[in-house]
Amino acid sequence: MTALFIRDFRLALRAGGGALVGILFFLAVIAVVPFGVGPDLALLSRIGPAMLWIGALLAALLGLDRLFQADRDDGSLDLLVMAADRHMLGVTVLVKCFAHWTATVLPLVLAAPMLGLFMNMTPLAIGATALTLLVGTPAITLIGAVGAALAVSLPRGGLLVSVIVLPLTIPVLIFGVSAAYGATTESAPFLAPFLILAAITLFFAVIGPLAASAALKFSTD
Amino acid sequence: MTDTAAQPTRLLDLANPTRFLSLAGTLLPWLAGLSALVLAAGLYMSVNAPDDYQQGMTVKIMFIHVPFAWLSMMCYTLMAASSVGTLVWRHPLADVSAKAAAPIGAAFTALALITGSLWGKPMWGTWWVWDARLTSVFVLFLMYLGIIALSRALDDPAKSARAAAVLTLVGFINIPIIKFSVDWWNTLHQPASVLRAGGSAIDPTLLRPLLVMALGFTLLFFTLHMMAMRNEIWRRRVIAMRRMAARRADEKGEEA
């Protein structure tokens, strides 16, 4: 399993600068926001956490179709599915998701504080947003694994993955943003939405790999 | 024990598409006629229902909005049950049922959203608010569209049915969220008022037409669903026959 993690991690980093493209997309989305809403610093700092979350969500969805596609192209996906009697396929999928998250989504979380400066956010808001992103983005990858596994046998699955995954990620976005706002405003609570966010991540850590492995089995037989 | 053993066999009897088609052929006229009758009665009762003391005439939107909203959730539950049938028992009619239900469910959800929006404008003063109930139903609508897109993306009906079934079951999380969203969050949409502990909060003069309309639309749903399933079976047979005809023509060409 560690070997699989390291292999996937290396492949994701080397395959055409996967992580870098994600960060560039994230940067582009955040850079477009001031042009859309105007360079009003007070407004930008108010909508900052939400914009960071939306940008990170879109950037995380961008690379999802590659989660199983490359393995399917070179045939190693069939080997992984056939090895399911030695390791549970769900665990394999979980490890793959974790490697994918570390290689492509974790850099987004690390880049978020710098982009937060562009949005004129206070240090507290930046820290809270980065923390909620760290806890919440694994859920996006785990939900996305289901979509990626469903669309793996489609010729042009990339867009379909985003379409079928986006509705399911809405709860993650809601609680992530409300926790980030809870940290900065006095009236709103921080801990309750933050704990729900963590619960969503843990919940999909179970459901996501199971559903994805079921979909992978059906697509290969 | 015998009950649980008898249940799957009775379901398996229906697995034979020919038997299902003959059953659908006999049931459909009755079902269609009954739903037309009940809907006509429901509409008559709705028109004659008294105006609400606060909402006036607009309360009549409820008689079509609420049944559509109920059915949008029931249809998804039916699709989830069919998906379990597809994945666990590989029941050949289950994927036909799930595939046929998706467009009907999407249409009913869209109608619930539209009628709710028409009702919200005079009552709340706005077409749309992002409150929990409305947002979760909107998410349900998007899920329907995603399932429709996925179940038609693959050429092999069995493969796409299983993919759509996995997605349907994952998306089933949304149904309890819709049901309880009005209790969990403080929303603009009113909490459950028909089915609740301590009796219904709606006056019987308004409740009776609502229930008749709900029954009528449920019958309409099952009529449409059965028709769509019959169409889907026929479509698959036509495709299979075309393939056989093509193969036969090919063999004949080789002999000549």
Image: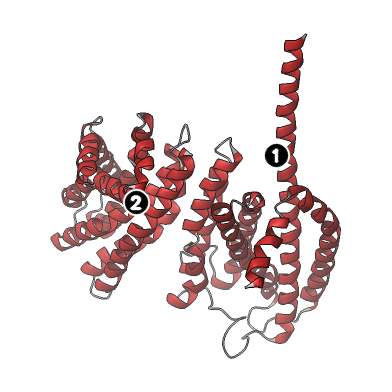
Q: Is residue B42 left or right of residue A108?
A: right
Q: Are marks 1 and 2 on the same chain?
A: no
The circle drawn on residue A88 is 2
Judging from the image, what secondary structure is the residue with disc 1 in? helix
Dot 2: chain letter: A
In this view, B116 is above or below A13: below
Judging from the image, what secondary structure is the residue with disc 2 in? loop
Residue at the spot 58% in from the left edge and 68% down from the top edge: B120
Residue A191 place in picture, x, y as percent: 25, 72
Structural crowding at the residue carrying mark 1, measured as other residues with C-alpha within 10 Å and reported as few (<14), some (14–19) or many (≥20): few
Which picture quadrant has residue B124? bottom right
The circle drawn on residue B236 is 1
* Residue type for callout 1: Arg
Q: Is residue A3 left or right of residue A214?
A: left
Q: Work out whether residue A84 can be spotted.
A: yes
Residue B115 place in picture, x, y as percent: 64, 63
In this view, A181 is above or below A91: below
Q: Nearer the viewer, residue A7 or B68?
A: A7
